[in-house]
Image (tube, grey):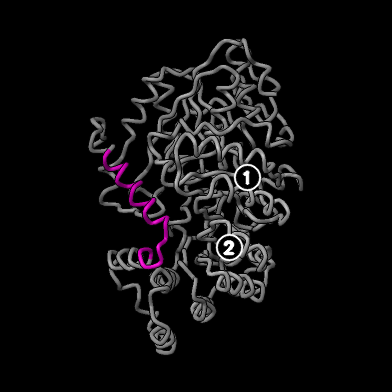
């Protein structure tokens, strides 16, 4: 399907992005290039900003802002189309950029991504936006580019919303791409100046998710597309990409960026057999405890896995089930973690906070539950985000945590993100969350006797007073002691960005 536009007028499409490497943009770029079009990237890595999930340092945020360089890169590329893939937290930034682009350049603007898919009726009303892509974008953006290159209007392109004479035209959504192997390899060259692929190569072997968590955008995509939204690439397709990219970049590690990497044991065995033979570098992935039996964990350990990330979110089973729509039990979590311990495989635990109806005892539960596990690498803390149209927002509203006005703000992109607690309204909730977040971050370093003393004497109520630099230092020590390979990836990434910023002459002061 990607060949039918060969011979059309060549178009120049510039992608604009705030944050780290974005695989979705890379796939869009590769599809457009295969059809004969030119693509460019105007990129702000967002280091030290709200989009930085490692070091958000407000005092440095303005100094390292790259909005001027982003606008300069867009203008230099002289695009016909400027395309934005936006999250709720980056929508307002993108809208501001798009407004300037339309005034200075006059190129058409296209918004896709999770926020555009969740709230197309809001995004298309933005004066800075010409077109909105709902859902998967490869086919839609290619069709739109072809229409614009032929000076046609986008009357009937599936997945596209646009305005005509002040009226919003809403086209239906096409089925998701059935055969992921038909897609060209992602255009890694787009981000190669901002990402050191030699340190860590990111790849997706599937799209979608088998689960429908109330707080996750993947659940909305399942509603949009139906039960067939989860698809997996064939082993030969995955290996072809890894072999080609290892030859090109010589990467030392791999990150499998799937929502859940190991859902199919037969597929996993076949992939990891070839991976161990032909790639043979350490890898990490995201897992789910319901699939993490001894066979799978040992297979991954033997094949080079050095870390698995488990999204538990809370150890209160009732909240996990009734609020988050997650049905795994603490017994299943215990079996998964024990399997990792037996295999000597490091693992991480993701927690969401604060959750509706959560209490202090619920924050203490992870401390007790995780006390005896030896290969726990990190406890990662994320703020619960109330993305528009997701069930979690209605749950929170019912419990008085947010209001109708808050929900309207979320729809306009006035939303926090997984790393910032903008939505916490009550001081007591924020204090409790701050106490436990700091304790969780250094928990793996604390000796067992001291852990139990902290719980018994309720000293966790005072951890918010620990200075942030001390927490960061303790986390770094933990990474070094456990030989967490990702730590060195982060160090090199920041050094790369700092070198680039020092050479830049287009800082916005």
Query: From the viewer's perspective, is residue 86 above or below residue 78?
Result: below
- Seen at 31% across and 42% down, the residue is 496
Q: Position of residue 192 (x, y in %)?
A: 42, 34
Q: Is residue 351 visible?
A: no
Say which quadrant the N terminus sits in. top right
Q: Nearer the viewer, residue 41 or 218?
A: 41
Total marks in image: 2
- Seen at 58% across and 66% down, the residue is 312
The Cα–Cα distance between marks 2 and 1, rounded to whole angstroms, is 34 Å
Q: Mark 1 falls on what kind of element?
A: loop
Q: Mark 2 falls on what kind of element?
A: helix
| Horizontal arrangement in the rendering, residue 393 relative to residue 269 (left or right) | left
Q: Position of residue 482 (x, y in %)?
A: 41, 66
Q: Position of residue 13 (x, y in %)?
A: 50, 22
Q: Label 2 neighbourhood size at 10 Å, few (<14), some (14-19), many (20+)? A: some
Q: Nearer the viewer, residue 476 or 435?
A: 476
Q: Nearer the viewer, residue 196 or 16?
A: 196
Span shown in magenta:
479-499
Say which quadrant the C terminus sits in. top left
Name the residue that disc number 2 marks: 396
> Could you say which disc has been placed on residue 205 in the image?
1
| Horizontal arrangement in the rendering, residue 5 relative to residue 307 (left or right) | right
Residue 326 counted in the magenta span: no
Q: Which SS does the magenta portion mostly show?
A: helix
Q: Is residue 204 visible?
A: yes
Dot in front, 2 or 1: 1
Residue 498 counted in the magenta span: yes
| Horizontal arrangement in the rendering, residue 251 relative to residue 286 (left or right) | left
Identify the image quadrant of residue 138.
top right
- Seen at 39% across and 41% down, the residue is 196
Which numbered disc, 2 or 1, marks the residue that appears first in the sequence?
1
């Amino acid at each position: 399907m990607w060949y039918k536009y060969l011979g059309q007028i060549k178009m120049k499409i510039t992608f604009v992005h705030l944050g780290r490497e974005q695989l979705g943009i890379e796939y869009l770029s590769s599809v457009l290039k295969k059809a004969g079009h030119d693509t460019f990237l105007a990129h702000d890595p967002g280091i030290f900003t709200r989009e930085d999930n490692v070091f958000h340092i407000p005092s440095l945020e303005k100094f390292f802002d790259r909005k001027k360089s982003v606008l300069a890169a867009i203008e230099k590329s002289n695009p016909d189309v400027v395309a934005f893939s936006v999250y709720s937290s980056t929508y307002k930034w993108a809208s501001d950029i798009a407004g300037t682009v339309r005034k200075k350049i006059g190129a058409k603007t296209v918004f896709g991504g999770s926020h555009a898919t969740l709230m197309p009726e809001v995004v298309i009303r933005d004066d800075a936006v010409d077109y909105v892509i709902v859902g998967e974008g490869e086919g839609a953006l290619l069709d739109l580019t072809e229409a614009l290159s032929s000076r046609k209007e986008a009357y009937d392109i599936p997945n596209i919303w646009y305005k005509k004479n002040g009226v919003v035209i809403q086209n239906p959504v096409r089925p998701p791409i059935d055969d992921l192997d038909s897609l060209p390899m992602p255009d890694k060259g787009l981000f190669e100046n901002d990402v050191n692929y030699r340190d860590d190569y990111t790849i997706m072997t599937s799209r979608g998710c088998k689960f429908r968590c109330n707080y996750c955008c993947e659940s909305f995509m399942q509603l949009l597309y139906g039960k067939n939204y989860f698809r997996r690439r064939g082993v030969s397709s995955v290996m072809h990409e890894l072999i080609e990219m290892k030859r090109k970049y010589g990467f030392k590690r791999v990150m499998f960026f799937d929502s859940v990497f190991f859902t199919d044991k037969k597929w996993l065995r076949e992939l990891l057999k070839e991976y161990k033979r032909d790639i043979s570098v350490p890898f990490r992935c995201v897992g789910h405890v319901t699939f993490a039996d001894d066979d799978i964990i040992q297979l991954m350990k033997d094949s080079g896995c050095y870390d698995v990330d488990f999204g538990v979110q809370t150890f209160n089973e009732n909240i996990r089930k009734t609020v988050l729509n997650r049905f795994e039990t603490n017994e299943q979590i215990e079996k998964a973690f024990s399997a990792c311990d037996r295999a000597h495989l490091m693992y991480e635990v993701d927690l969401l906070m604060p959750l509706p109806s959560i209490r202090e005892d619920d924050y203490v539960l992870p401390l007790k539950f995780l006390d005896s596990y030896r290969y726990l690498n990190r406890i990662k803390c994320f703020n619960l985000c109330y993305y528009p149209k997701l069930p979690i927002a209605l749950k929170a509203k019912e419990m008085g945590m947010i209001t109708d006005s808050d929900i309207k703000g979320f729809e306009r992109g006035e939303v926090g993100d997984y790393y910032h607690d903008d939505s916490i309204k009550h001081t007591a909730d924020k204090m409790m969350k701050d106490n436990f977040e700091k304790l969780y971050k250094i928990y793996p370093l604390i000796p067992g006797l001291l852990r139990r003393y902290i719980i018994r004497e309720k000293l966790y109520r005072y951890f918010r007073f620990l200075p942030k630099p001390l927490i960061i230092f303790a986390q770094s020590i933990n990474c070094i002691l456990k030989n967490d390979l990702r730590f060195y990836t982060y160090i090199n990434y920041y050094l790369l960005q700092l070198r680039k910023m020092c050479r830049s002459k287009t800082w916005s002061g």
